[in-house]
Image (cartoon, helix red, strand yellow):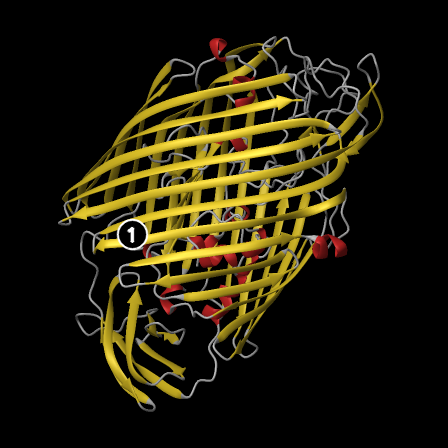
Amino acid sequence: MKQHIHLNFSKHFSFLFSMLLIAVTANAQYKISGTVVDNNSRPVRGANVYLDNTIDGGTTDSMGIFHFTTSEKGNQTIIASEVSHENAGLPIVINGDMSGIVLHVKANKTHDLDMVVITAGSFDASNDKSKTVLRPLDIVTTAGANADVVKAIEMLPGTQQTGTENGLFVRGGDASELAILVDEMVVQNAFFSGPPGVATRSRFGAFQYQGVSFSSGGYSARYGQALSGVLELNTTDLPDKSTVNLGINMAGIYASGTKKWKKSSLDIGGSYLNLTPFYGLATTNFKFYKVPVGATGNLRYVWKPNKDGILKISANNSYTTSGISLPSPYAGDTGHASQANPFLGLPDTINFVTKDQYYYTNASYKQLFKDKYSIYAAASYSLDQTNNTFAGIPINETDQRTQFRLEGKDYFTSRLNLLVGGELQNFGISKDFNNYYKQTFTENQIAGYSELEWTPINILAIRPGIRYEHSALLNKDDIAPRISMAIKTGDHSQISLASGIFYQDPDYSYLLAGLKKELGLQKAIHYIANWQLTKNDRTLRLEAYYKSYEDLVRELGSFYSPNTYRILTDTVQVNNSGHGYAQGFELFWRDKKTVKNLDYWVSYSYIDTRRIYANFPYEATPTFIANHNLNLVGKYFVDKWQTNFSATYSFASGFPYFDPEKPFNSQTFLSEHTPPFQNLAVTVAYLHSFGKWFTVFYLSIDNITNQHNIFGYRYNYDASGNAFGTPNPIVPALYRAIFLGVNMSLTQFKKDEL
């Protein structure tokens, strides 16, 4: 599986194939049974027992007894794993049915799983079963996510539904308040380029990563420049074997291959994207007169010079183009909302053409010395060039980012370690409107950080940290202290607390307008508390938070416009007098135990948030906030049919919008709400083997009930600035989507990837 930022729309769907390779066993011939016991010969309940490098296995009952069937024979290794014990393995030779196998597992070491783990504000999705509630497999098998990491994260508490915008909207913050990182390096332009008001996919697929950590607040001092949270992706290491993957679906075709040597591997892949079959069957709300077409390529090299060191180098690129007719976000604009707007007077419906070239490279090296010290060094570079045409007006944009990071860690004891590091970033954006109006900025940032992790006793963990940042563009410095801690309240439960200060540059639209002299850094202070219970494949998590916003950018004397794509110039008067708050309560419940082969979770969020910033004349709830969000996710594996069924229901209470026909005051501003958002998505995937090829056929239907969800309204204005006529709803590019595909691989997933 690829371990980079893939730029392949079609390949993201291919990861659905992986879940069935893991979930299904076939052609069993031999019966394997035995018991799992601890050091005191007591039975261990709920242990996973499996044959290494296969998908054959079972789970122990209350007496520690397991049994399963397999078609494997000859020399094998049987493994037992359970969250509160160390893994145990035993070589066996399978020549027929086997019984009476005894596997002895030891209690975890005091510095490992018995210790408390800080979870406030953080959801991890990794293959470490002891410290996570979601894993990469969960991401790709979630209906409605379409194997998109960012879309899957929207099924967790603290996020908002985003039908027409890109990005993760976390706990009252907009998309700009969350940073996305790969191997600790910031990713600029994390989503495919597209027209205004049409959401596009992120550039990430779940199995490119061995760990996915989503923090909706209180995150590590290692990172900055994000008022609300971070999404951290860690790429996989050296693969197990060489393999080939092929796929074809309604978005295009792809091929990739991995060649593994003893201490290194080389990955290469490519794809061709053409959505003609997809849009030929879909009923779209906007006309795609040029369907999206493109191509991607990727190359990756991994080298382990020794058992404790690893080098990763990757290069990726993509090219996409499309043409669409859509409502102009400037329709009816009389000039009150923006200055020197080159798009005034355009038709209500415009043609938008985009041509996008994206390049991303990343290199990192990590080395552990004598289990005592470690160093990590990384560098990355990204370049995104878009040549768009907006109603015949050329808009050219170039985004670039260069980053370097160096950090060291000292493991004083198994209970105490210290992290010290620093980073340097250079990034900027250049926009050219019709070759006569240009906006540009370049920022240089330097940061240093230190974080201590201390577990004085097994039931208590403390992590204080501090971060220093300097912005050369704003000529500003900040110091951001942070602290988090966790206390065990029982064998399977704990309380976590987190607080900290977080800074971020003003929105890029203000920097492009050349307003740096008037502005400073924006600030948020987080307070988070949660309680989590994890037992017998069930997880209950309750979390409450309060976030204070300070020094937000505010425009002075501007007429309010709901258009998020308005053009700003240096004539706008701004300062950092904006402020606000966000507070809420969240619940997460997951159960993989009650019903055999059924895995489901419930995610609920309540948020109360108001702010005065940007061109808000009064304090109000932003238009991207729904106070109530609910996600119900269920997955059911049918071994007999070799088929997986997955369904997701999502609900969000209405979004605020501006009604200019209402009296304009603090009570009515953004007081209207859209109808509630509802979406039901279903995915069915069927596995079949053709010789050595593991093949999956899949069908995915998003919004199966064809709900006409609305995210706001656009109004028309007369020459005097008065609204008239029927408002136009803001809707996604299509209500219902149907996607078909088939994927093939020569490689089977290991059991421990479940």
For image coordinates 23% across by 76% down, the residue present is: 90
Query: Going by the image, does 408 lie left or right of 556?
Result: left
Quarter-of-image position of residue 574:
top right
For image coordinates 59% across by 33% down, the residue present is: 386
For image coordinates 42% across by 27% down, the residue present is: 225
- Residue 231: percent from the left, percent from the top? 44, 41
Q: Amino acid at mark 1?
A: Gly
Relative to 686, say whether 462 is above or below.
Answer: above
Relative to 209, say whether 455 is above or below.
Answer: above
- Residue 561: percent from the left, percent from the top? 69, 20
**Extreme-front residue of the structure:** 435
**Extreme-bottom residue of the structure:** 96
For image coordinates 37% across by 40% down, the residue present is: 120
Badge 1, how many Cα within 10 Å: few under 14, some, many 20+? Answer: few
Q: Secondary structure at mark 1?
A: loop
Residue 583 in view in this figure? yes
Query: Going by the image, does 694 lie left or right of 279?
Result: left
Quarter-of-image position of residue 319:
top right
Quadrant of the rendering where the N terminus is positioned: bottom left
Relative to 663, say whether 50 is above or below.
Answer: below
**Number of marks in the image?**
1
Q: Which residue is mark 1?
A: 490
Relative to 103, say whether 208 is above or below.
Answer: above
Query: Going by the image, does 354 lie left or right of 2?
Result: right
- Residue 746: percent from the left, percent from the top? 46, 70
Viewer-proximal residue, 214 or 325? Answer: 325
Quarter-of-image position of residue 573:
top right
- Residue 624: percent from the left, percent from the top? 61, 33
Residue 613 in view in this figure? no
**Extreme-right residue of the structure:** 725
Viewer-proximal residue, 173 or 627? Answer: 173
